[in-house]
Image: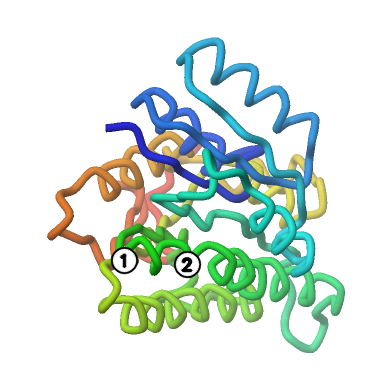
Amino acid sequence: MSKNIMITGATSGIGKACAIKFASLGHKLIITGRRLDRLEALKDELEKEFDVSVLILHFDVREAKAVQQAIGGLSDYWSDIDILVNNAGLARGLDTVDEGNLADWEQMIDTNIKGLLYVTRAVAPGMKMRGRGHIINIGSIAGREVYPKGNVYCATKFAVDALTKGMRIDLVGDGIKVTQISPGAVETEFSQVRFHGDQERASNVYKGYKPLSGKDVAEVVAFAASLPEHVNINDLLLMPTAQAAATIFNKKEV
């Protein structure tokens, strides 16, 4: 049965891969993000290849009013959101706490924590009213282990872990599933964003081993979403075979 799935941060990486995966399964999609040109290109791609309905919501999850207006203004055809994938998030900078960039800190906190909350606050009441729904939060290994110079990014992902647990407790009586999928190293635009567009530094992160891809994570997200109503994956940590912990890799010379 086709479901209505909303994915934040769908313009690249894990979010885009999730959109492609769910479209391939015949679901209709609400895709959100800050880069309108990418959203439009993805909408055209999904509609042509999979013959599914796709709606673009163009907003920044950091802007509470924009989130409320976009989701609150959905038509009846789109407003019954069955699955919310809270994917929008980023890392900015890799500095010791005494040398951290305040703007980077604020962007991570506003996107990874407050953005997730703003979107969930706008979507969850409808799920509660219908007595069903599934919220899937994209966490990180950084929400399990703190690594050198990861201070604030790790803190935001620890917050996602805590919020996921809190949501599950708050919504368990309303028939709403809450899942956290936490990947290790995934080769997307993640490191490019972290290093402010430094391509060489970003590419070095993934040298010497095979990292996860956005598609790998999307497969797991879709599996979690496919389970029977009485079955929920609460928390899942997904790693490349060559990664044992946040900073422990089996890297080969290249």
Question: Which of 35 and 5 lies nearest the eye of the viewer?
Answer: 5
Q: Residue at x 64, y 50 (%)?
A: 190
Which type of secondary structure does the marked residue at label 1 adopt? strand
Which label belongs to residue 196?
A: none
Q: Residue at x 46, y 43 (%)?
A: 5
Report the number of numbered marks. 2
Q: Is residue 235 above or below residue 29?
A: below
Q: Is residue 40 above or below residue 150?
A: above
| Mark 1 in CB contact with mark 2 (< 8 angstroms) | yes
- Residue at numbered disc 1: 176
Residue 28: image x %, image y %?
46, 32
Kind of residue sitting beneath label 2: Ala
Q: Residue furthest bottom?
A: 98
Residue 40: image x %, image y %?
72, 26
Kind of residue sitting beneath label 1: Ile
- Residue at numbered disc 2: 124
Question: Which of 182 and 10 lies nearest the eye of the viewer?
Answer: 10
Residue 51: image x %, image y %?
48, 14
